[in-house]
Amino acid sequence: MNKTITVIKGDGIGPEIVSQAMRVLDAVAELYGHAFTYQEISAGGNAIDQYGVPLPEESLQKCLDCDSVLLGAVGGPKWDGVEPARRPEKALLAIRKAMGLYANLRPAKLFSQLSDASPLKPSIVAEGIDFLVVRELIGGIYFGARRTETVDGKTVANDEMTYGEDEIRRIAHVAFQTAQKRRRSVISVDKANVLDTSRLWRRVMEEVASEYPDVMLSHMLVDNCAMQIVKKPSQFDVIVTENMFGDILSDEASMITGSIGMIPSSSLGEGTRGLYEPIHGSAPDIAGKNLANPIGTILSAAMMLKYSFDMEKESAAIEAAVEAALNDGLRTPDCMSEGMSLLGCKEMGDAIIEHLKNQK
């Protein structure tokens, strides 16, 4: 199988972590008889530096003319002073919208080897943390109308949250179909006691639920959900929610797993093509120092093989290689603990590739 992957190494630690994920993909290609062709593009801060815009047209076109996109991270304090319309993060919003990537899937899974790194009490961790946040990605307040105006001599800013029932319906189907492959439970998160968009969200979720009688649907207000994630995370299987709530809750969920550097994500639309990235930022303070954790990016590549390329066994092999490296006591600085062996970014990539090869 030959697949073309558009690569956005991005800013900060992006080039380091993406390079390790590409090495793992190359090892998969060699071991399983595939061919991956990479086309690297500029996006984010580095694109601003080179071209004056966060996403040149040529870069966007290569995202549209590929089988999937692998991303490191974009942004950093260097570009904080850039005008809002040209900020590095605008590149991600534009790619998601152009590719029609309306569903973001972000797992929150605690590797047993890292249980001591979770900030939660051992009694809570012992119950297990393994759930998935399905976030609507191209609607809501992030894409709504906005304006800043002067009223009675004072500045007033407005950001509009808008959802149509078709937008809600399609993300609902993703959540229910995902739950069918897991533990068949969906918790829909909203703020229906206050927001009209949430009341519509809840109604549509109920309608779609009737098409999935094998999946249990329940509802939870977003503030309660934020509390329950740290109080009893084992109760969750699939959480589905709108864009802003999903952004906040998925970041909270990632922190209870011990290290934000371990968590991958996928953004999908109607077809098989998607965008895959770790959830952490560009971490410019450690960029170029071989200190970054590449596992979140490597597991993002594994998700790409599974969800976009239908390479289930290859994806599982990468996940097993990561588990084996952790079982060996290998750690990067973000999840280092007493008695473990400290590795740099490249060395962790080496170890995972070695375990990958040992499986064949």
Image: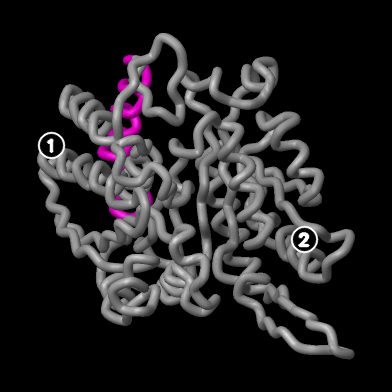
Quadrant of residue 230 within the rendered picture: top right
| Coloring scheme used | one colour
Image disc number at residue 31? 1
Q: Where is residue 289 in the image (x, y as percent from the top left)?
A: 30, 39
Q: Position of residue 228 (x, y in %)?
A: 75, 36
3D distance between C-alphas at marks 2 and 1: 47 Å
Observer-nearest of 348 and 88: 88
Q: In this view, does 67 lie to the left or right of 143?
A: left
Residue 317 visible within the image:
no
Q: Residue at x 59, y 29 (%)?
A: 129
Q: Which residue is drawn at 32% across and 56% down?
A: 70
Observer-nearest of 56 and 302: 56
Describe the element under mark 2 as helix, strand or loop.
helix
Judged by its main secondary structure, the magenta piece is: helix
User: In the rendered structure, which amino acid carries the disc numbered 1?
Assistant: Leu
Q: Residue at x 84, y 60 (%)?
A: 192
User: In the rendered structure, which amino acid carries the disc numbered 2?
Assistant: Arg
Q: Is residue 312 left or right of residue 112?
A: left
Quadrant, the C terminus: top left
Is residue 315 located in the magenta-colored stretch of the structure? yes
Q: Position of residue 87 (x, y in %)?
A: 48, 71
* Neighbours of disc 2 within 10 Å: few (<14), some (14-19), many (20+): many
Q: Position of residue 162 (x, y in %)?
A: 70, 76
Q: In this view, does 282 lie to the left or right of 24?
A: right
**Mark nearer the N terminus (2 vs 1):** 1
Magenta-colored span:
307-328
User: Dot 2 corresponds to which residue?
Assistant: 202
Observer-nearest of 14 and 40: 14
Observer-nearest of 340 and 301: 340
